[in-house]
Each structure stands twice: as C-alpha cells, then as structure tokens.
Image: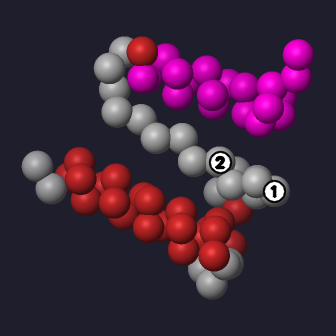
C-alpha cells in the first residue's frame, strides 16, 4: 500500500511517530503540493504565513519556559 503522504515523506512520518511514542511533543505539518521548506521562498504565500505562525507558536510555547 502506498503511503498517503508519498514515498518521500515516509522517513519523516516514521521519525514523528517515534518521537510521539517516546513522549516527545512533536508536530508534523504537511502542506500539499509543497516541497521541504518551500514555504521559505515566498513570504507572502498563505502556506508560508501558516507555517511561520505554527513555528512561532511552537517556539513561543517551548522557549518561554
């Protein structure tokens, strides 16, 4: 059976699952049609705004301790 996110994401998905199983808070964001870190190429794209918001929230939560 093909992986729903495509073959290129399988290691990422496995790593995310292992982190979660180990009790680590981990967030995996998948943006359809986007390659790895493509959101950084156009800071006006809606996907970029969403990704940066998610990143900022994660850092804010974990670095504010």
Residue at image point 34% right, 33% down: 25
In the figure, 26 relative to 23: above or below? below
Occupied quadrant, residue 55: bottom left
Is residue 28 visible in this depiction of the protein? yes
Q: Secondary structure at mark 2?
A: loop
Is residue 19 one of those drawn in magenta?
Answer: yes
Q: Which residues are magenta?
A: 1-20
Q: Say above or below: 44 vs 20.
A: below
Residue 6 appears left or right of 15: right
On the image, the x and y values in percent for residue 47 come to 64, 68
Residue named by callout 2: 30
Task: Using residue 5 as the reference point, say whether residue 27 is left or right of it.
Answer: left
Residue shown at 81%/56% (left/top)? 33
Q: Residues within 10 Å of mark 2 (few under 14, many from 20)?
A: few
Does residue 8 show up? no
Q: Indicate left or right for 24 with 60 as reference.
A: right
Q: Residue at x 44, y 67 (%)?
A: 53
Quadrant for the N terminus in the image: top right
> What is the spatial separation of the Cα atoms under label 2 and label 1, in whole angstroms?
9 Å
Look at 76% across and 54% down and name the residue there: 32
Tell me: residue 38, above or below residue 18: below
Q: Which residue is mark 1?
A: 33
* Colour mapping used in the image: secondary structure
Please, what secondary structure does the residue beneath circle 1 have? loop
């Amino acid at each position: 059976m093909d992986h729903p996110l495509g073959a290129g994401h399988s290691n990422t998905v496995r790593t995310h699952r292992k982190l979660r199983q180990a009790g680590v808070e981990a967030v995996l964001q998948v943006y359809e049609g986007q390659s790895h870190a493509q959101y950084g190429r156009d800071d006006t794209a809606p996907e970029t705004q969403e990704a940066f918001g998610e990143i900022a929230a994660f850092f804010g939560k974990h670095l504010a301790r």
